[in-house]
Amino acid sequence: MLAAVGAAVTLVVGGGEWLRGAAGAEEVVASAPSSPASLVTPSPVASSSVPPSASPSPEPPVLRLPGPVPSAGRGSFEIDDRTGPVLGTAGRVRGYRVAVEVGSGVDPAEFALAVQEALTGPGSWVDSGRLRLRQVAEGAAYDFTVYLATARTAGRMCAAGGVDIRIGGRPYTSCRAPGKAIINLERWRLSVPHYVEAKVPLTVYRTYVINHEVGHELGHRHERCPGKGKPAPVMMQQTLFLNGCVANPWPYLDGRRYAGPSL
């Protein structure tokens, strides 16, 4: 059922106006940052020999991927068989595996590096200083697995863990089951309508959904929007709504835990 694969490159990076390390976050009910840090890499400065009008315009962020998304795979998974770096500076090291459903069309190594980027931060769960994370190879001891699964398989796995991810009768969201952070392939490729309408980059949604489901595995529960225009807590169900908050993929802002009222 499980097979090893090689390495590839990642594509999770920060997006436009989306928050990383913003100031003003409080421990439970947070105030909005006065000046969110931009995650856009500055465009290269034009050479003095090239007129400013010749400078290329930055490409717009990718909001969702084109093309059909497989709704079902084989139900078996490939493990990215590598050992990653230790993420974080202090605390217990929790090992995780990364697995991608066969037939999803996604390279397990590519997904693994996207997971690593999301869990590295700055702004991820390891910023607590009490936790470290590390991807482990197949056969090594581990604490949980991050899965990328087609909608049908994700629905079945989540239901087995006691979570119904259906919206309108179709598996829609991702979930956490005991020892499993299960990412729905449709959301991984398509994001969600309110993110797309707000022009939130797909990379930001991907970072959010990883940190959200891993957050459940670490024992965190759902939270609510702390106020209109404020960053959405990462444990808010941003896949379903923002409720006036601004999309935010990080549990830590400016090195401090950013959370909202309990749901």
Image (tube, grey):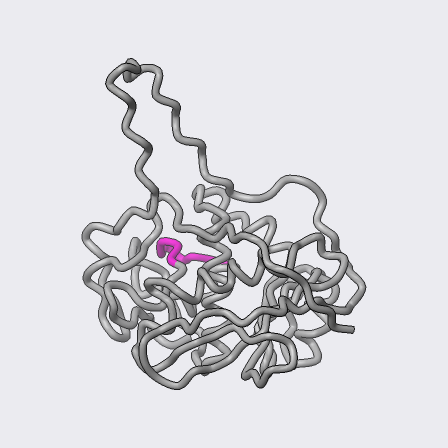
Quarter assignment of residue 219: bottom left
Q: Determine if residue 97 is in view.
A: yes
Question: Is 244 colored magenta in this rendering?
Answer: yes
Q: Residue at x 46, y 80 (%)?
A: 218
**How many callouts does the rendering have?**
0
Quadrant of the snapshot with the C terminus:
bottom left
Q: Nearer the viewer, residue 135 or 125?
A: 135
Q: Pinpoint residue 262: horizontal percent, then vertical percent.
A: 38, 77
- The image quadrant that residue 109 belongs to is bottom right
Name the residue located 25 percent from the left edge and 74 percent from the top edge: 27
- Magenta-drawn stretch contains 144: no
At horizontal 30% and vertical 61% (from top left) the residue drawn is 227
Rendered view: 7 above or below 160: above
Q: Which residues are magenta?
A: 240-248
- Look at the picture and state if 155 lies above or below 179: above
Rendering quarter of residue 106: bottom right
**For the N terminus, which image quadrant?**
bottom right
Res. 175 in view: no
Prevailing secondary structure of the magenta residues: loop
Say which of 146 and 150 sits in front. 146
Q: Which residue is painted at 42% across and 57% down in the image?
A: 242
| Rendered location of residue 12, percent (x, y) | 48, 53
Above or below, 221 against 247 in this view is: below
117 left or right of 176 in image: left
Q: Residue furthest right?
A: 74
